[in-house]
Image (cartoon, grey):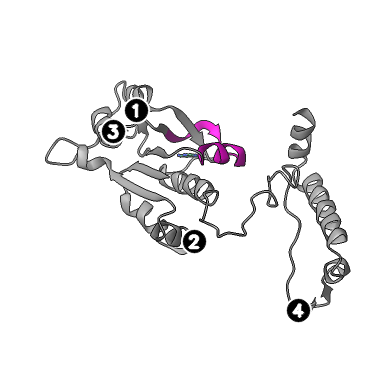
Amino acid sequence: MTFHVLTLFPEMIKQMVSHSILGRAVSSGFFSVNAVNIRDFSGNKHGQVDDAPYGGGAGMVMMAPPVYDAWASVAERKPRTIYLSPQGRTLTQSLAQELAHAPELILLCGHYEGIDERVIEEIVTDEISIGDYVLTGGEPAALVLIDAIARLLPGVLGKEASHQNESFGAELGGGLEYPHYTRPPEFRGRCVPEVLLSGHHGKIAEWRQRESAERTRLRRPDLVEQKSKD
Ligand code: ADE
């Protein structure tokens, strides 16, 4: 899978995908990230990519031509083009799973007051928000999306990784994951639940299912309600 990221800050994108699990996965060729600097397509010697809004008001608007030309430079195979914006559909695990099947995605990061609406109409196929709050730019949202998708790609988390048994996964009925413990068996008077030391796999699986259901009911009743409607 290749992510093409259209941005005014390519270093932000390159930095994050050069570390930890994502960095290793990129080095191993499990996915790649192509950060495209929109400023390279400004078409003027000052590198100007924004201008005052028609109709007046505060802030600057990113101009349509540089955004379009940056997009056209990577859009040969017409992949889905995602604009990161608080007005988009909210990112969920199932949306990340759907997008993980794409061979290529283009992510468009906005800045200033926004992007000229005409280029959004022209190139964007999906608008995605990472939550109901406003960021200064789309880059952190693009990085969240890349992380959520990349960890689902074959090889990225290693062979044993199962996405069924984690929060929002199918094995836990789309609910939250159960708690985890490791050594020591007692920490500041808090003991590891007996059943986890029992070696009884059936009982352990049952306990984990129960803990997951209880957590979901207490912390995310909205997920329980949603499931009853599905
Ligand atoms: N850009 C600014 N705020 C955003 C958000 N909440 N999600 C995605 N992109 C954004």
Task: Report the disc number at residue 67.
Answer: 3
Q: Residue 131's x, y, as percent?
A: 56, 40
Q: Which of marks 3 and 1 is nearer the N terminus?
A: 1
Q: Which of marks 4 and 3 is nearer the N terminus?
A: 3
Q: Count the marks.
A: 4
Residue at numbered disc 2: 21
Q: Residue 211's x, y, as percent?
A: 82, 54
Identity of the amino acid at label 3?
Answer: Val
Whole-angstrom CA distance, mark 2 to mark 3, is 31 Å
Whole-angstrom CA distance, mark 4 to mark 1, is 60 Å
Describe the element under mark 4 as helix, strand or loop.
loop
Viewer-nearest residue: 11 or 152:
152
Q: In this view, does 149 lie to the left or right of 42?
A: right
Q: Residue 52's x, y, as percent?
A: 27, 30
Whole-angstrom CA distance, mark 4 to mark 3, is 55 Å
Viewer-nearest residue: 209 or 137:
209
Residue at numbered disc 4: 184
Question: Which range is magenta?
Answer: 82-100
Task: Please identify, in this view, whether the residue under mark 4 or under mark 2 is nearer the observer.
Answer: 2
